[in-house]
């Protein structure tokens, strides 16, 4: 490869032409009416390439481990994994961002999941150990957590026939909005219980869980 140079001067003294020096050192003369098209042709492949950038949403996880005796080889865990969208000046619960009355992927990019090595009571429902896909149904009157068996479904391919259960979520309004969606498992200070919390904007959602 080489450098392409353009200028108004040329070896023959022609002032009405532009010389374009090719990578192989061979010069080609273009008349003024050809200059715009010639340079545009050279720049087009560069303009067509997208500038490198990161995915607009990162990935968040929340993992809690059961306390076990020293030397134990198996440590039971409960794990949340989700895409983390950001507000970036947008407003929630509009037609384009988490509208009320429509199932939401509850994250970004890949499907949000809950994986547990222990049987759980989630709210008032018994959930056997395994991996589950998480969705929510937002509403001004109250949200529902939708639990589906994880069968590799895409986050944008929700199908109600895969629903295992829909659970009501507690909801409260925060004084200070949170920029990025945050989900976490909060263990209680004693016992095998805790809360699953979801927070974005000024909305905080939660539901109790207990290991069995």
Image (spheres, rainbow, N blue to C red):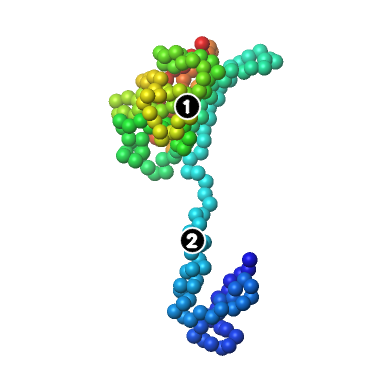
Q: Is residue 183 left or right of residue 9?
A: left
Circle 2 residues within 10 Å: few <14, some 14–19, many ≥20: few
Image coordinates for residue 120, horizontal then vertical, percent: 48, 15
Circle 1 residues within 10 Å: few <14, some 14–19, many ≥20: few
Q: Is residue 1 left or right of residue 109?
A: right
Q: Is residue 156 above or below residue 210?
A: below
Image coordinates for residue 154, horizontal then vertical, percent: 45, 33
Quadrant into which the N terminus falls: bottom right
The numbered mark, 2 or 1, whose residue comes first in the sequence reads 2
Q: Is residue 189 above or below residue 49?
A: above
Give the secondary structure at mark 1. loop
| Tag in front: 2 or 1 | 1
Give the secondary structure at mark 2. helix
Q: Which residue is mark 1?
A: 151
Which residue is pictured at 61% across the width and 16% down the height? 67
Image coordinates for residue 146, horizontal then vertical, percent: 39, 24
Residue at the right extreme of this rendering: 71
Image coordinates for residue 136, horizontal then vertical, percent: 38, 28
Q: Is residue 172 visible?
A: no
Q: Is residue 141 left or right of residue 183?
A: left
Which residue is pictured at 44% across the width and 13% down the height? 126
Q: Confirm or deny contact between disc 2 and disc 1 (CB under 8 A).
A: no
Which residue is pictured at 59% across the width and 78% down the height? 27
Mark pair 2, 1: CA separation:
41 Å
Which residue is pictured at 57% across the width and 84% down the height? 10
Q: Is residue 211 above or below residue 29?
A: above
Residue at the bottom extreme of this rendering: 13
Q: Quadrant of residue 175?
A: top left
Q: Which residue is mark 2?
A: 47
């Amino acid at each position: 490869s080489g450098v392409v140079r353009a200028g108004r001067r040329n070896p023959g003294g022609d002032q009405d032409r532009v010389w374009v020096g090719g990578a192989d050192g061979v010069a080609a003369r273009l008349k003024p009416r050809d200059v715009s098209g010639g340079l545009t042709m050279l720049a087009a492949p560069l303009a067509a390439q997208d500038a490198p950038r990161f995915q607009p949403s990162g990935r968040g996880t929340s993992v809690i481990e059961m306390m076990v005796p020293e030397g134990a080889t198996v440590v039971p865990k409960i794990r949340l994994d989700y895409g983390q969208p950001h507000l970036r000046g947008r407003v929630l619960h509009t037609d384009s961002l988490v509208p009320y009355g429509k199932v939401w992927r509850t994250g970004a990019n890949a499907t949000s999941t809950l994986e547990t090595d222990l049987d759980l009571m989630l709210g008032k429902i018994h959930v056997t150990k395994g991996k589950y896909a998480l969705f929510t149904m937002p509403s001004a009157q109250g949200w529902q957590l939708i639990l589906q068996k994880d069968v590799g479904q895409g986050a944008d391919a929700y199908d109600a026939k895969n629903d295992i259960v829909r659970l009501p979520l507690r909801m409260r309004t925060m004084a200070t909005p949170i920029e990025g969606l945050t989900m976490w498992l909060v263990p209680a200070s004693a016992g095998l219980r805790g809360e699953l919390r979801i927070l974005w904007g000024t909305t905080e959602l939660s539901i109790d869980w207990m290991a069995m």
